[in-house]
Image (tube, helix red, strand yellow):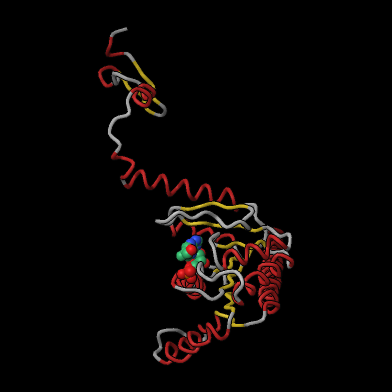
């Protein structure tokens, strides 16, 4: 066999003759460390982003019905808001929901604590921040993300309702992202419950009055949010919305089955003729 006839296979590639590299892929991987700049390049970041999706999907894919609870990272134990967060976390867990939070301190911790103490699954989707921070002590299953947008996908994909406790920019971002997704039909309509009439009332009034009268939202858009102080109502609103959704899906499925049966009968009659 001449050199020109030689063949080397490398995964899906076939090299022949002078195209055969001097070293194998394994040799190149194992022999040298080489420059490290590539770990800061976009293609490498894409792989890291991909691996975050894989981790998140892996952790969450078998989670049952779940509710994400958002709220301030800064409100400490002992405050009314913290107690409210605990109560809501507990009520959701007792109603059969997994509680998902950002896994941080403050009201995230309160909701995780309530859920854990009520015996329900308590999940934290942490975020890597410039300062050291670990998941709060009441997270039973957690994953920490580098990228905010990957983490946001997890909240939306794996929960069927959002509860928004008092909070600052982070909480506002999560609130507005969730109602924008519902408003634009990017997610099936699901309940977004704001807790704390005193805290949220001013914002809700401004949305209702100013945004509506300026015509920058549709007249019905304020109804995408439900505002309450009552933890029991939080669970009731969510459970009722889910029951309505299930009934709607069931009746759609029944209609589909009936429509298929009718078209099957029509086809059979045509075939007979
Ligand atoms: C500022 C402090 C801690 C920050 N730690 C966080 N850990 C996890 N998730 C966070 C954190 N900060 C914000 N979030 C997300 O935004 C919401 C809270 O933001 P807010 O600005 O405090 O309202 C929350 O739902 C998280 O998903 C101090 O210790």
Residue 167 locus on image (x, y percent): 50, 74
Q: In which quarter of the image is residue 238?
A: bottom right
Screen quadrant of the C terminus: bottom right
Residue at x 46%, y 73% (from the top left corner):
168
Q: Say if 47 sits above or below 118 in the image.
A: above
Residue 13 in view here: yes
Q: Say if 74 sits above or below 199 in the image.
A: above
Residue 129 locus on image (x, y percent): 43, 57
Residue at x 63%, y 82% (from the top left corner):
229
Q: Say if 31 sits above or below 263 in the image.
A: above
In the displayed image of the protein, which residue is found farthest to the left? 18
Residue 1 locus on image (x, y percent): 32, 7
In the displayed image of the protein, which residue is found farthest to the top? 1
Residue 266 in view here: no
Name the foreground residue: 123 vs 212. Answer: 123
* Residue 213 left/right relative to 101: left
Q: In which quarter of the image is residue 41?
A: top left
Residue 264 locus on image (x, y percent): 69, 61
Name the foreground residue: 267 vs 221. Answer: 221
């Amino acid at each position: 066999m001449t050199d020109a006839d030689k063949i080397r296979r490398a995964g899906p590639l076939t090299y022949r003759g002078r195209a055969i590299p001097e070293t194998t892929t394994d040799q190149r991987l194992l022999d040298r460390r080489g420059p490290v700049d590539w770990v800061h390049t976009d293609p490498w970041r894409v792989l890291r982003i991909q691996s975050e999706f894989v981790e998140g999907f892996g952790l969450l894919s078998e989670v049952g019905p779940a509710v994400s609870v958002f709220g301030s990272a800064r409100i400490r134990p002992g405050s009314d808001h913290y107690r409210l967060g605990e109560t809501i976390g507990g009520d959701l867990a007792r109603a059969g929901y997994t509680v998902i939070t950002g896994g941080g301190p403050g009201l995230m911790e309160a909701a995780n604590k309530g859920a854990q103490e009520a015996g329900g699954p308590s999940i934290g989707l942490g975020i890597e921040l410039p300062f050291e921070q670990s998941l709060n002590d009441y997270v039973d299953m957690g994953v920490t993300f580098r990228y905010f947008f990957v983490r946001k996908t997890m909240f939306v994909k794996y929960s069927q309702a959002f509860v928004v406790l008092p909070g600052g920019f982070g909480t506002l971002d999560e609130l507005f992202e969730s109602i924008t997704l519902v408003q634009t039909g990017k997610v099936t309509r699901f309940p977004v419950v704001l807790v704390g009439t005193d805290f949220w009332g001013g914002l809700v009034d401004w949305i209702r009055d100013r945004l509506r009268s300026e015509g920058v939202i549709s007249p019905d858009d304020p109804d995408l949010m439900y505002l309450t102080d009552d933890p029991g109502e939080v669970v009731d609103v969510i459970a009722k919305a889910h029951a309505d959704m299930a009934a709607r899906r069931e009746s759609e499925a029944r209609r589909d089955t009936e429509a298929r049966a009718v078209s099957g009968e029509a086809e059979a009659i045509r075939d007979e003729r």
